[in-house]
Amino acid sequence: MRGFGFAEHGGLDRLSFVEVPEPVPGPGEVRVRVRAAAFNHLDRFTLEGMPGVPVERPHVLGSDGAGTVEALGEGVSGWSRGEEVLLNPAIWDGTCEACLARQESYCRNFRILGEHTQGSATTLVVVPARNVHRRPERLSWAEAAAVPLVFQTAWRALHTVGGLRAGDQLALVGAGGGVTTAAVQVGKLLGARVVVASRSRSKESAVRALGADDFVPFDADHPLDKVLWPASSKKGFDVILDSVGAPTLPRSVRALARGGRAVVIGATGGPTVEVDVRTLFWRQGSIRGSTMADAAEFTEVLGHLAAGRLHAVIDSTRPLEEAVAAFQRLEAPDLFGKVVLTVP
Ligand SMILES: [Zn+2]
């Protein structure tokens, strides 16, 4: 079976189509024929290789996918061939203490489709049956593939970890990625005032169209904390979502309100951060990490998508054959939303 990914870790020049065995669904698993898949920044980290994360090679990338049920493993019921589904990329074992407490994102064997397993950028993918959800009628194949990772990430980071409440002030640092386009909508749905800070002034109209209340551009002459603080109406932000890391987090923290939470969900700009802890203790702020979501959170945010209260934001859609160009699009300065692959 042909899939898109890499044979050896490295940079973008390592991207290629690879041959992998057709996956066979084991007990409790479902095989899905992929109709659409989508990339995330996570795929870039998987391509480069991360310390302590063993990756099967050749490796197929892609954590997001939607398609039709094609085969059922032993013991799976409730699904029939041809049913239209989307995949939850958060994989948990269902047996550890965290899973039994329904805190699946804390699972001691937590894995992500396409990172720790063979991914969705191919024709067939196998996942646990509990990771398969009916495709909401409102979502096209491309939209169904665009939403699973970023919306569960935004939902848990803001709602659960950030504790965002109606009337809160929320800042999102960085504007173009899929999580931010999801987080603007989740922030508004939860009743917050949403401010987006970005280096790309060209994204202002797009983030405002998604519902952002304010947009603040920053650059070397206009440092992030200097533009964020006044945008918060001088109270500081109750929640700041930062996916950039090294270049922005130290300055994000300076714009926190008293008791504010900086929630870290990524490190696209680098992983090592120096923070002035005096700001943290004086404002009684905190820095918290968030990854993916629990099963109930996924179901909850999927319900909002199915009801049309949240919407997929797609930057571009290309056929699987053009996966290299699609992947390169993730690096484009004008990226806005998800990069989706359609699989014939
Ligand atoms: Zn577990």
Image (cartoon, rainbow, N blue to C red):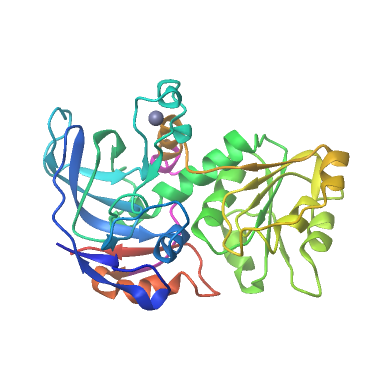
Quarter of the image that includes the N terminus: bottom left
| 189 or 67: nearer the viewer | 67
Residue 233 coordinates in the image, percent (x, y) = 84, 50
Residue 119 coordinates in the image, percent (x, y) = 29, 55
| 86 or 252: nearer the viewer | 252
Does the magenta portion include 332?
Answer: no
Confirm whether residue 204 shows in the render.
yes
* Left or right of 21, for residue 223: right
Does the magenta portion include 314?
Answer: yes
Give the quadrant of ligand 1: top left
Residue drawn at (14%, 57%) of the image: 21
| 46 or 120: nearer the viewer | 46
* Left or right of 26, for residue 311: right
* Left or right of 32, for residue 147: right
Residue drawn at (43%, 49%) of the image: 149
Confirm whether residue 309 shows in the render.
no
Which quadrant of the view contains residue 71? top left
Residue 224 coordinates in the image, percent (x, y) = 77, 63
Tell me where the magenta segment starts and ends, as one range. Answer: 304-317
* Left or right of 117, for residue 210: right
Residue drawn at (35%, 49%) of the image: 116
- Asked if 10 appears above or below 235 in the picture, the reply is below
Which quadrant of the view contains residue 104? top left
- Asked if 116 appears above or below 178 in the picture, the reply is above
Quarter of the image that includes the C terminus: bottom left
Residue 156 coordinates in the image, percent (x, y) = 54, 39
Residue drawn at (19%, 40%) of the image: 30
In this rendering, the count of numbered labels is 0
